[in-house]
């Protein structure tokens, strides 16, 4: 008999670990508290409350990363929140209960669909919904445009602190690169750790960690800048160092796929490169080469190219492509966006309807906080924040704890200066509390109750607990109602995207092989032995319901060098797989009524990963010998057949067969 807790409970008990982000703690202490204090001193307390709320929500989005990545991560949700504040204010002033409920339900549908695009869009959708409820229900004297301006100002204040205050990177003498340099160095460390794990059971986990490091570095370097391309020698050098890591990652992945242990000194080179990135120095001597296998030869070649790139520092392509408007629209209107939007709209709309009914029946008495109910529902219903049951449990526990803590402080703290100090302390705790949803909820509850009391309302801990428990009940009921269409749309959409990216990557590598055969024939060098690629081979190839990425040349690369595009497609394939894995893990931790809709997805994702790993190994072998072996093609075919068998009856990805893209 197993004593392990069910997945939904295990997820609720799990917390992130890591060092305390002291820079974020300082920013949190200087954000909501000082803004509220400024509002009180200027006799515009209500605007100070709105600005403090904006700073609080921006602080939740102030995650580790580079400055330029934080502009998008904090700025886009802030713009959406300001729009929601204005919309909610004017709607609350001019609409009745029924019309207001219908409007906010429609806003929930749009915000939920947009949230399927990605993490930043999800943050924007969250703030749009929260501020529309606050704007419609919070009794403030200011007009909607002034509330929106105060909200935007509060978020921009935190963003300004993020851009201006020194960070560990700045204290080391490099103010411009706080997170970028560490992110690139972490890629080289991840390559070294994967090489150390080759041939062991840890290789799979290390390969996943390498993907995460590459994703993080790519995000850190691709934020907004004044010019489209790197505009300083230091930034060009950092770009070159990131680009030089991609062939190293490719070779290390191929070695992990082969499963044969490599010499211990193989990981010394990437580690020296990591030190060179962190300290902004030259690489120094690299270990002697070991060239007994294609992947080892590729690793040594990549090390030499990296050393040359470090010395020249002429810049490098980041091997990423902007998402097109059509791709964004496809995410919003696809299966994942439709299911996401419908669930959010139903839960948000139901909570608004219940809150309006209770408000107009005078259940609240003289102090109306009906916006608390729909605002709480937003954080409970967002699927990307964790499994539904786990979110409900953590939200309830965190709210009760936070309300009780605030009730104790409210008895002893002077007003308003003591409450302003409590807001500042709570803002400082948010970056640490984000590691667990219950802890974050407790800190936010204390902060919100303090803001309400500073705004002139009486102590409201009991009402906060009651409305949170009511919101939990609404989300548990509505969130498990049967939905039209197929459930598990988020998982299906992520798997479809991963399938499309894997297909594009595989197709490109096979076309490279075809091109190598054609070039060999033109040079009158006939392929020999089993390395010959057939002119026309009847083998299945992966096809997904999404169109594959265009086989277009990457700007700034030579037209006859297919590797830069291959690295781009490989990055997209592994990133899409990581996103699919995350969605599958969250879906599996739901209650059985929801988790059953994504059964079989884990096995399909595992085979997709093996297919992409195999494609990477084939690409390295192709660079080494100029051809693919029959064994390479057989392994690809076996994986495609296995994918077809696993997906049969599930329809999670929508695979169909066709010929390999090899023509004579």
Image (cartoon, helix red, strand yellow):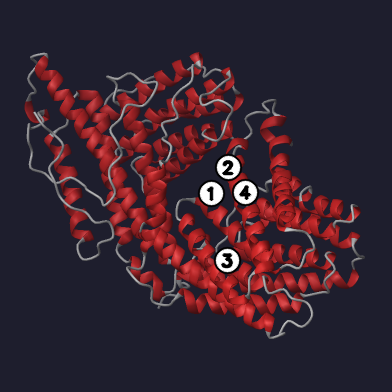
Mark nearest the camera among 4 and 1 is 4
Q: Which mark is residue 72?
A: 2
| Camera-nearest residue between 500 and 312 | 500
Q: Look at 60% across and 37% down and name the residue there.
A: 66
Under circle 1, the secondary element is helix
Q: For residue 79, which numbered disc appears in the image?
A: 4
Q: Which residue is mark 1?
A: 120
Q: Is residue 494 left or right of residue 312?
A: left
10 Å crowding of disc 3: few (<14), some (14-19), many (20+): many
Of callouts 3 and 4, the N-terminal one: 4
How far, Cα to Cα, is label 1 from label 2? 7 Å
- Residue 378 tag number: 3
Measured in 3D between alpha carbons, the distance from the residue under mark 2 to the one under mark 4, in whole angstroms, is: 10 Å
Q: Is residue 637 left or right of residue 147?
A: left
Q: Is residue 10 left or right of residue 607?
A: right
Is residue 231 shown above or below 633? above
Q: Do labels 1 and 2 touch, CB within 8 Å?
A: yes
Q: Secondary structure at mark 3?
A: helix
Percent coordinates x, y for residue 354 in the rendering: 60, 80
Q: Is residue 570 something one can see in this rendering?
A: yes
Reading the chain from its start, which is encountered first: label 2 or label 4?
Answer: 2
């Amino acid at each position: 008999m197993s004593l392990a807790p069910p997945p939904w409970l295990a997820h609720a008990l799990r917390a992130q670990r890591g060092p305390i982000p002291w820079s974020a703690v300082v920013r949190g202490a200087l954000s909501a508290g000082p803004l509220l204090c400024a509002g009180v001193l200027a006799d515009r307390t209500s605007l100070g409350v709105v600005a403090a709320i904006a700073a609080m929500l921006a602080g939740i989005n102030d995650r580790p990363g580079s400055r330029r990545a934080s502009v998008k991560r904090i700025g886009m949700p802030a713009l959406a929140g300001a729009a929601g504040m204005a919309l909610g204010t004017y709607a609350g002033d001019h609409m009745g209960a029924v019309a207001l409920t219908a409007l906010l339900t429609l806003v929930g549908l749009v915000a939920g669909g947009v949230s399927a695009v990605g993490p930043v869009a999800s943050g924007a959708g969250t703030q749009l919904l929260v501020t529309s409820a606050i704007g419609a229900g919070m009794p403030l004297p200011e007009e909607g445009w002034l509330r929106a301006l105060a909200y935007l100002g509060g978020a921009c204040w935190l963003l300004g602190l993020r851009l201006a205050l020194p960070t560990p990177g700045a204290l080391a003498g490099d103010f411009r690169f706080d997170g970028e340099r560490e992110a690139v160095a972490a890629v080289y460390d991840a390559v070294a750790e994967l090489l150390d794990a080759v041939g062991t059971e840890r290789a799979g986990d290390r390969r996943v960690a390498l993907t995460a490091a590459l994703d993080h570095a790519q995000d850190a370097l691709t934020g907004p800048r004044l010019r489209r391309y790197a505009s300083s020698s230091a930034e060009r050098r950092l770009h070159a160092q990131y680009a030089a890591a991609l062939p190293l990652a490719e070779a290390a992945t191929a070695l992990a796929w082969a499963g044969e242990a490599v010499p211990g000194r193989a990981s010394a080179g990437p580690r020296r490169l990591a030190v060179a990135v962190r300290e902004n120095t030259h690489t120094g001597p690299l270990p002697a080469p070991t060239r007994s296998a294609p992947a080892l030869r590729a690793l040594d070649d990549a090390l030499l190219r990296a050393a040359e790139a470090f010395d020249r520092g002429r810049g490098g392509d980041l091997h990423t492509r902007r998402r097109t408007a059509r791709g964004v629209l496809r995410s919003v209107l696809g299966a994942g966006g439709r299911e996401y939007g419908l669930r959010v709209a139903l839960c948000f709309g139901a909570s608004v309807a219940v809150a309006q009914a209770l408000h107009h029946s005078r259940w609240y008495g003289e102090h109306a906080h009906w916006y608390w109910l729909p605002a709480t529902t937003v954080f409970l219903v967002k699927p990307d924040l964790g499994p539904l049951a786990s979110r409900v449990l953590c939200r309830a526990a965190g709210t009760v704890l936070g309300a009780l803590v605030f009730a104790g402080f409210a008895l002893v703290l002077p007003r308003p200066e003591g409450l302003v100090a409590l807001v500042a302390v709570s803002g400082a705790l948010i970056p640490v509390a984000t590691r667990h949803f219950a802890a974050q909820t407790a800190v936010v509850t204390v902060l919100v109750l303090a803001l309400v009391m500073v705004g002139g309302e009486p102590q409201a801990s009991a009402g906060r607990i009651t409305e949170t428990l009511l919101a939990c009940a609404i989300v548990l009921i509505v969130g498990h109602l049967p939905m039209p269409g197929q459930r598990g749309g988020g998982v299906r959409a992520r798997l479809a995207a991963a399938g499309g990216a894997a297909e594009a990557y595989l197709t490109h590598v096979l076309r490279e092989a075809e091109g190598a055969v054609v070039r060999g024939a033109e040079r009158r060098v006939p392929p020999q032995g089993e390395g010959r690629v057939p002119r026309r081979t009847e083998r299945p190839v992966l096809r997904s319901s999404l169109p594959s990425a265009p086989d277009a040349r990457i700007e700034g690369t030579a037209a006859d060098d297919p590797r830069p595009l291959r690295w781009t497609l490989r990055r997209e394939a592994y990133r899409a797989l990581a996103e699919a894995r995350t969605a599958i893990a969250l879906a599996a931790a739901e209650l059985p009524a929801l988790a059953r809709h994504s059964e079989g997805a884990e096995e399909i994702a595992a085979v997709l990963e093996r297919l992409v790993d195999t494609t990477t190994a084939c690409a390295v072998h192709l660079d080494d010998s100029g051809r693919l072996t029959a064994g390479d093609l057989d392994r690809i075919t076996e994986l495609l057949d296995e994918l077809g068998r696993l997906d049969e009856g599930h329809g999670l990805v929508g695979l169909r067969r066709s010929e390999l893209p090899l023509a004579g």
